[in-house]
Amino acid sequence: MSPQTHETHETAETAETPVTPESGATGVTGVTTQTLDTDAGPARVTWHRAAGARLVLAVGHGAGGGIEARDLTALAAALPGHGVTVALVEQPWRVAGKKVAPAPKTLDTGWRGVWPALTAPGLPVISGGRSAGARVACRTATELGARAVLALSFPLHPPGRPEKSRADELLGTGVPTLVVQGGNDPFGRPEEFPAGPYELVEVAHGDHGFAVPKRAAVTQQEALAAVTAAVVTWTASLG
């Protein structure tokens, strides 16, 4: 179905306000919020537009939170300065104020529903997400024609249940794929991932949300910088 849209434009002052603990947004020419009707209900996209953008990075949230996740806000602040427009996608269940995410099939439906808006700028689109959102991006990449997939904190298995592997979703993207994974992620540590046609970058000491212990050898700021640096380098390789 064709998405119906409504855009709310924020002021330039709001767009320039720092959105991560460690730095301000750089290269952002404007921030707009767009509401889209999908077969799963209304979804919302917050655009962080880059001047002279060459790619769009669309990123969905996980099942336990929204687009305020530290890694998503860090990417939205950093990537526009490198020619990548960032679109933070809120699934219909979050827009509706529900506390529990629906079944994977419904999440995929919501993602498909926003895709026409993500491609509207006429640029290649990287399909991305964190946790459950990463699974959605992996499952739908080929059918939607994604340029690549970014999987943040890919939930390889439920905590303590390595036999319940979701590796087939990751291995089946059919496009260039980057996994950024915390070294202490209970949903799958980097060494648990099978060999495959994807790149994996470890964020030392990071948990599922890339939080690091205060006693760790790296600070929280350094951990988030590792996330953004990995994505900046990878997106540069995509053209």
Image (cartoon, rainbow, N blue to C red):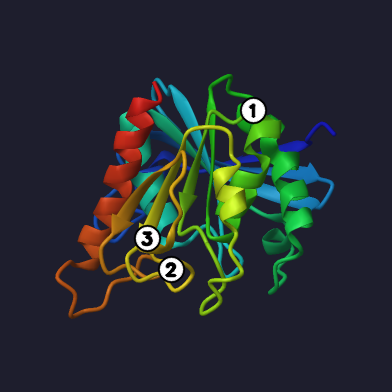
User: Which of the marked residues, 3 or 2, is nearer the chain's N terminus?
Assistant: 3
Which residue has dot 1 on it? 145
Q: Where is residue 54 in the image (x, y as percent from the top left)?
A: 43, 22
| Rendered position, 61 above or below 49 | below
Say which quarter of the image contains residue 235. top left
Give me the C-alpha separation between circle 3 and circle 2.
Answer: 12 Å
User: Which amino acid, by three-letter code, is at mark 1?
Assistant: Gly
Q: Where is residue 213 in the image (x, y as percent from the top left)?
A: 26, 78
Residue 198 bears which disc, if any?
A: none
Q: What element carries label 1?
A: loop
Q: Residues within 10 Å of mark 3 (few under 14, many from 20)?
A: many
**Closer to us: 32 or 94:** 94
**Closer to us: 187 or 33:** 187
User: Which amino acid, by three-letter code, is at mark 2?
Assistant: His
User: Which of the marked residues, 2 or 1, is nearer the chain's N terminus?
Assistant: 1
Tell me if residue 89 can be seen: no
| Foreground: disc 3 or disc 2 | 3
Q: Where is residue 26 in the image (x, y as percent from the top left)?
A: 30, 39
Question: Is 239 positioned to the left or the right of 150 in the image?
Answer: left
Question: Is 171 positioned to the left or the right of 193 in the image?
Answer: right
Q: Is mark 3 on a helix, strand or loop?
A: helix
Tell me if residue 172 can be seen: yes
Which residue has dot 3 on it? 190
Quadrant the N terminus occupies: top right
**Closer to us: 103 or 56:** 103
Which residue has dot 2 on it? 208
Q: Are marks 2 and 1 in contact (CB under 8 Å)?
A: no
Label total for image: 3
Q: Are marks 1 and 3 in contact (CB under 8 Å)?
A: no
Quadrant the C terminus occupies: top left
